[in-house]
Image: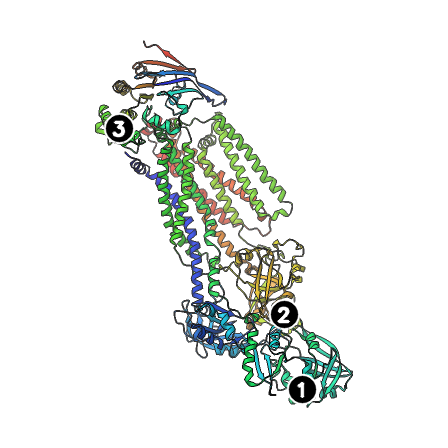
């Protein structure tokens, strides 16, 4: 098993009453190798929270997150950072490319924390391959401000994959795109998933994108329930 | 990609934000470094002035009332292999006869060529009947080479003015000189033995001429020496080695009756220590004390004005005993007395202020000796000035009133025939009991010796006396000058505190800007976290960027500090000259200070940036990645509760403190009122924060512009609060500063004020021998005929010269001038107010505490608290030591500190103790005068005319106080200016917050437009929101300051520079309006249709 959530619980305080509201109420999820999972659900149902906990950007109130056989609760902040750097790739609804860097600069950013020069060199080569693969070769020196939203999002996908992660986490990756671009990105993600042999968890409202995943789950009232693919 | 490249990219992309942060660090470092450099510059300037005023002079011997031979200077110079010069220094008056301009308190210096050699730039030595004047004297009197100059000095002679029978009338000598040169600062123009940055008014005349004027031929009272060549050649040891009887004021001469020799003193009386030393060397010597008797009387017969000698029994051949008297046959015949008869002897004894009281004693005639007896020796009469050389008794000019009508022809005959031959002898013990005085109890010592033995006797005597016993000691003036300069008022510290608000405002601006910048990059840090950057790596990137900015700002600021230093020096040398009393301050750039300033700037900036970064990065990565602000509402409520509680606590504390202080003596406790004001700022800020937080929690839907503006302000309260607090603190400081400007509206007549209720202050250059309020003084100065002085009370005060320890002198003072004040007069008036008294002193009768000596050689003294703290750099309970003319040390223990008074610069002791410990000071140089306000001009006119020859300087006490206050007020003006700059920087911060908010609220503004809000309404909304913050800060500052300055407000002397304050507030508000209006208008201007849609969708 590549990754697993065990009985995850998470609460937030309610704005007006100040009372605690359960967002995730004993959620469990197992992610196998090369498996893709879509998580759907209404807004505010806790999808992003689930993804953040899985990606170690947030912590659960209780429960365990097992990544690559290790419980993240046992890991220090630097170990978590290394885990996010090598094991996980993130794609957000907005691309979040750094405006001060060029496309290639953004894509190579995850190589910076690596201390191994060989790994960085290999990462650089891989980045160029991926850029070519996603059709951005001619735009490597462009700043994000000179790219379309779709191009930015593709660059963000390359950035997420540059360190060859085992698990790609995508939060509404097509949420900010028009239908055609969204469809193309959906295809790209599944193709890359297959080419790279990685696992993927996608939080999405898009039925089309969800349909491309191996499994679909729905999150509501703090519970994660599987949905049978039609 | 590397970290360096990433950071370079950041710098390129965020250059505007970084430049703003850089500007903030630059300003704070510039003020900090500039202030430190100002300290260096002032110290350097004072040290430079020490070099200028002293040239190569390293040691100086300056005596008050004692004189030594000019020749010893040459001998010391030869022995030392260096330069030594004698001089005669006295305060006097200079007049330009051409334009009648007068200059009081001029230092008249008799010098010879040796004196000019202490300066590298050879100055002209005044030749016969010529004078060289300092450039400031020339400027003040309008003199140039070739002009005539009148000099007026007191020709006292060698005898102490206070000694009995010393000629009464002050011999004010006037002499005309031709100015031949003007000595600039590089020559001897600025010569002074006192550490003071203000240039003295010097007039140099030939030494011999000066000695002639002062009746001190061949003598000097100043001896200057350059560096000693060897440790054994210290000027003091050389002086002791080389000095001769004449340097101690002694003369050894033959009586004309070989082998009898006599030792007498030019000071009339031989001081007791010297007499004891002489008699220990000459055990067989005979001692004499000759005194003037007012009369010998027997029954109805009386013989007026005769000398009587108290002599050793071995001289008389028999001991007349305690009550016995040996008289000559002339007196016996005149009185008709014979052996065994009792006669009455009347004589004067010296009281205070030269007041002579007649006393009498009865003696029994033990022997009548014929006039031919060799004991009747006219040389026993000391050389009383004005008497010994008089042709007739009626020509006597003595320090005692002589009723010339009593002098008979036979008395004149006696004088002609026998001169001052004593008419009677009594025992030495009896004479000393009656007539011993502070100047000695012998007038001559006689011994038998051959001429060839005289030299060895002289040597033995001089080796037995120490020059230090006579106050003849050298002071390392150069070293002390340097120490005074280095211990001078620390302008670095002063301007650091004056500029503190700018530093604070700049740092707050740095914090605000950096926090806005980091907030702008929250998503970026979140993304970096998400892609595997550790917190340390992210912090590393941000801090490296911050460090680069801090280093650039630090070093840039240090360089800019030079500009700040220059500007402040320019101000001090010109518009703020009141604070420093000189325009000679020059810049000094020390590399170490630049580095210190740079690193201090870097350190403070880094600390600020660290705090900001830490508080930003402690938020969870996911909130940063989503750039969301999922605020914890419960925590928000908790914060509101804490804020409300704090507000209530602080406000109640403030009000409670005021309620406690107001009714009682606590009204004078300025620090507690300041605390109350500060508590109110804390309370008001907490209340404002609570209001904003509550408003942000509120879900009420009521509308209105103000409501909406308030809600908006509440949303970004973490940005608005620091700006509001900064404004409040700035206004608070400025108002307190303005309110503390020292004024004395309607308070100058108040006896508790700094004037003591006295209306006028007068000083003379030449001392007044008589108290002008005494009958003798009234008569002497013809004051009894002055109708305008009828209702005027004059209090005469004696002064021991010393350093100026007032705030007008930047150097540290070691020995301030001392005033002997009439304590009973002061106590009866309950004059002046004290800030601090030693425990045990009755606060209702503080002046009486000055009357009791505190131990052998220790007497109590008061001084202005500012003099104690700043001028002397001492505290209550410390003692300042002074050397007397007999070398004895007198300690003045500071037992209390006066509130800001006209006595700034002086130490005050009781007049009775003054006369005991400083008997060498003759006459009065300070007067305090009461009089009706209507007669100001006439009193001033009369006093200045009648005392013109004494160089009287006459001023209102309120004006004198104002001149001291102007120093403090100048500093307050500087603070006001720098504080205002700080507030303006704070308002700039408000503008930057607004600018940033406008960018973030692009969508909101677009929405308003889309909803049909008119642009003017939106502009009003924004202005209302931010001006609200401005007004809240300003209002809180004013209210808190009003509480803090409540004692001043309630004081009748309170005066606020309302116009200045209103103008300043107007500048703040307009400046604020500008900084709100500009970004708001710019943001609204950008709201074009396309951006509306972009903003919204």
Q: Is residue B526 above or below residue B397?
A: above
Q: Is residue A144 visible?
A: no
Which residue sits at x=54%, y=80%?
B456
Res. B852 image quadrant = bottom right
Q: Is residue A68 above or below residue B384?
A: above
- Relative horizontal placement of residue B547, taking residue B262 as reference (left or right): left
Q: Nearer the viewer, mark 1 or mark 2?
A: 1
Q: Secondary structure at mark 2?
A: loop
Which residue sits at x=43%, y=26%?
B630
Can you identify the residue that label 1 sits on? B376
Can you identify the residue that label 2 sits on? B771
Colour mode of the rendering: rainbow
Q: Do the dots labelled 1 and 2 sit on one chain?
A: yes
What x and y, as percent, mark residue B1031?
48, 39
- Relative horizontal placement of residue A176, taking residue B300 as reference (left or right): left
**Which sits earlier in the primary sequence, circle 1 or circle 2?**
1
Q: To which chain does the residue with label 3 belong?
A: A
What x and y, as percent, mark residue B607?
42, 40
Res. B42 image quadrant = bottom left
Can you identify the residue that label 3 sits on? A123
């Amino acid at each position: 098993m590549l990754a697993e959530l065990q009985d995850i619980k998470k609460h937030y305080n309610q704005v007006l009453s100040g009372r605690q509201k359960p967002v995730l109420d004993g959620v469990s999820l197992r992610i196998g190798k090369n498996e893709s999972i879509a998580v759907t659900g209404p807004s505010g149902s806790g999808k992003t929270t689930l993804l953040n906990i899985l990606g170690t950007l947030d912590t659960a109130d209780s429960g365990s997150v097992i990544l690559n056989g290790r419980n993240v609760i046992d890991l220090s902040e630097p170990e978590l950072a290394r885990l996010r750097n090598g094991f996980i790739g993130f794609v957000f609804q907005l691309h979040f490319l750094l405006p001060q860097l060029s496309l290639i600069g953004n894509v190579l950013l995850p190589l910076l924390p690596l201390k191994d020069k060989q790994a960085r060199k290999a990462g650089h080569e891989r980045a160029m391959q991926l850029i070519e693969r996603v059709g951005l070769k001619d735009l490597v020196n462009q700043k994000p401000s000179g790219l379309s939203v779709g191009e930015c999002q593709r660059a963000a996908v390359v950035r997420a994959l540059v360190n060859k992660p085992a698990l790609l986490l995508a939060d509404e990756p097509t949420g900010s795109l028009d239908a055609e671009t969204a469809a193309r990105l959906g295809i790209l993600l599944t193709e890359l998933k297959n080419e790279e042999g990685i696992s993927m968890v996608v939080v999405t409202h898009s039925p089309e994108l969800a349909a491309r995943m191996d499994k679909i789950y729905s999150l509501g009232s703090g519970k994660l329930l599987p949905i049978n693919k039609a | 990609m590397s970290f360096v490249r990433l950071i370079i990219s950041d710098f390129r992309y965020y250059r505007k934000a970084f430049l703003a942060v850089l500007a903030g660090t630059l300003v704070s470092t510039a003020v900090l470094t500039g202030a430190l450099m100002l300290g260096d510059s002032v110290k350097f300037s004072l040290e430079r002035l020490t070099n200028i005023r002293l040239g190569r002079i390293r040691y100086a011997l300056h005596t008050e009332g004692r004189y030594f031979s000019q020749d010893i200077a040459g001998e010391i110079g030869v022995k030392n292999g260096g330069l030594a010069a004698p001089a005669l220094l006295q305060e006097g008056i200079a007049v330009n006869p051409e334009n009648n301009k007068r200059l009081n308190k001029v230092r008249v210096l008799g010098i010879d060529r040796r004196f000019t050699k202490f300066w590298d730039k050879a100055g002209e030595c005044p030749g016969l009947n010529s004078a060289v004047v300092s450039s400031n004297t020339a400027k003040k009197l309008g003199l140039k080479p070739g002009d005539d100059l009148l000099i007026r000095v007191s020709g006292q002679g060698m005898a102490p003015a206070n000694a009995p029978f010393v000629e009464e009338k002050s011999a004010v000598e006037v002499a005309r000189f031709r100015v031949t040169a003007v000595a600039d600062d590089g020559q001897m123009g600025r010569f002074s033995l006192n550490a003071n940055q203000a240039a003295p008014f010097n007039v140099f005349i030939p030494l011999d001429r000066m000695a002639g004027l002062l009746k001190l031929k061949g003598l000097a009272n100043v001896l200057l020496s350059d560096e000693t060549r060897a440790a054994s050649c210290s000027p003091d040891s050389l002086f002791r080695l080389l000095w001769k009887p004449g340097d101690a004021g002694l003369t050894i001469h033959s009586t004309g009756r070989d082998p009898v020799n006599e030792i007498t003193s030019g000071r009339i009386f031989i001081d007791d220590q010297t007499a004891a030393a002489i008699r220990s060397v000459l055990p067989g010597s005979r001692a004499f004390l000759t005194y003037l008797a007012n009369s010998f009387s027997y029954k109805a017969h009386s013989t007026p004005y005769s000398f009587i000698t108290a002599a050793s029994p071995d001289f008389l051949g028999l001991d007349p005993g305690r009550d016995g008297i040996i008289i000559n046959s002339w007196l016996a015949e005149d009185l008709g007395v014979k052996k065994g008869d009792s006669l009455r002897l009347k004589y004067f004894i010296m009281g205070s202020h030269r007041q002579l009281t007649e006393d009498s004693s009865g003696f029994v005639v033990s022997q009548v000796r014929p006039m031919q007896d060799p004991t009747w020796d006219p040389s026993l009469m000391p050389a009383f000035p004005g008497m010994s050389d008089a042709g007739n008794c009626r020509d006597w000019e003595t320090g005692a009133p002589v009723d010339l009508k009593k002098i008979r022809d036979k008395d004149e005959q006696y004088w002609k025939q026998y001169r001052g031959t004593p008419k009677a002898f009594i025992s030495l013990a009896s004479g000393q009991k009656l007539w011993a005085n502070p100047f000695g109890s012998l007038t001559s010592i006689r011994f038998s010796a051959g001429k060839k033995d005289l030299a060895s006797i002289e040597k033995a005597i001089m080796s037995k006396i120490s020059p230090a016993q006579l106050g003849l000691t050298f002071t390392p003036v150069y070293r002390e000058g340097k120490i005074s300069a280095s211990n001078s008022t620390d302008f670095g510290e002063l301007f650091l505190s004056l500029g503190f608000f700018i530093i604070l405002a700049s740092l707050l601006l740095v914090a605000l800007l950096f926090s806005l910048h980091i907030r702008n990059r929250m998503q970026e840090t979140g993304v970096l976290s998400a892609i595997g950057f550790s917190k340390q790596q992210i912090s590393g990137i941000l801090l490296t960027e911050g460090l680069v900015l801090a280093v650039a700002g630090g070093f840039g600021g240090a360089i800019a500090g030079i500009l700040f230093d220059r500007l402040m020096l320019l101000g001090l040398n010109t518009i703020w000259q009141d604070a420093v009393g000189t325009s000679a301050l020059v810049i000094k750039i020390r590399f170490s200070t630049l580095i210190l300033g740079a690193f201090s700037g870097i350190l403070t900036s880094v600390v600020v940036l660290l705090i900001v970064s830490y508080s930003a990065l402690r938020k969870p990565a996911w909130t940063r990645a989503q750039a969301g602000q999922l605020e914890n509402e419960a925590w928000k409520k908790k914060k509101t509760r804490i804020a409300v509680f704090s507000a209530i606590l602080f406000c109640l504390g403030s009000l409670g403190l005021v309620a406690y202080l107001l009714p009682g003596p606590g009204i004078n406790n300025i620090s507690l009122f300041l605390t109350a004001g500060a508590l109110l700022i804390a309370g008001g800020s907490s209340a404002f924060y609570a209001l904003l937080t509550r408003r942000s929690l509120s879900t009420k839907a009521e509308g209105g512009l103000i409501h909406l503006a308030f809600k908006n302000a509440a949303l970004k309260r973490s940005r608005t609060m620091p700006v509001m607090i900064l404004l409040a603190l700035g206004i608070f400081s400025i108002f307190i500063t303005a309110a503390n400007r020292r004024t004395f509206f309607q308070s100058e007549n108040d006896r508790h004020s700094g004037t003591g209720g006295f209306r006028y202050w007068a000083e003379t250059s030449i001392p007044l021998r008589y108290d002008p309020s005494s009958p003798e003084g009234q008569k002497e100065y013809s004051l009894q005929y002055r109708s305008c002085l009828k209702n005027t009370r004059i209090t005469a005060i004696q002064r021991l010269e010393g350093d100026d320890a007032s705030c007008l002198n930047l150097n540290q003072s070691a020995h301030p001038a001392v005033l002997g004040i009439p304590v009973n007069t002061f106590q009866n008036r309950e004059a002046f107010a004290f800030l601090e008294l030693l425990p045990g002193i009755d606060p209702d009768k503080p002046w009486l505490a000055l009357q009791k000596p505190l131990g052998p050689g220790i007497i109590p003294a008061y001084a202005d608290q500012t003099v104690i703290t700043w001028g002397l750099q001492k505290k209550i309970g410390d003692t300042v030591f002074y050397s007397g003319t007999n070398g004895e040390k007198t300690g003045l223990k500071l037992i209390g500190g006066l509130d800001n008074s006209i006595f700034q610069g002086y130490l005050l002791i009781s007049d009775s103790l003054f006369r005991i410990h400083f008997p060498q000071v003759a006459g009065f140089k300070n007067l305090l005068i009461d009089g009706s306000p209507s007669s100001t001009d006439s009193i001033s006119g009369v006093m200045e005319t009648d005392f013109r020859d004494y160089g009287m300087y006459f001023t209102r006490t309120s004006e004198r106080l104002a001149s001291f206050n102007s120093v403090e007020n100048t500093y307050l003006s500087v603070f006001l200016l720098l504080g205002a700059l700080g507030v303006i920087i704070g308002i700039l911060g408000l503008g930057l917050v607004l600018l940033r908010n406008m960018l973030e609220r692009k969508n909101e503004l677009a929405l308003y437009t889309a909803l049909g809000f008119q642009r003017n309404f939106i502009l009003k909304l924004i202005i209302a929101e931010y001006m609200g913050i401005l007004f809240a800060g300003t209002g809180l500052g004013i209210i808190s300051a009003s509480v803090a300055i409540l004692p001043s407000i309630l004081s009748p002397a309170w005066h606020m520079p309302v116009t200045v304050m209103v103008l300043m507030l107007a500048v703040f508000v307009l400046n604020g309006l500008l900084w709100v209006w500009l970004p708001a208008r710019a943001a609204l201007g950008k709201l074009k249709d396309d951006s509306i849609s972009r903003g919204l969708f």
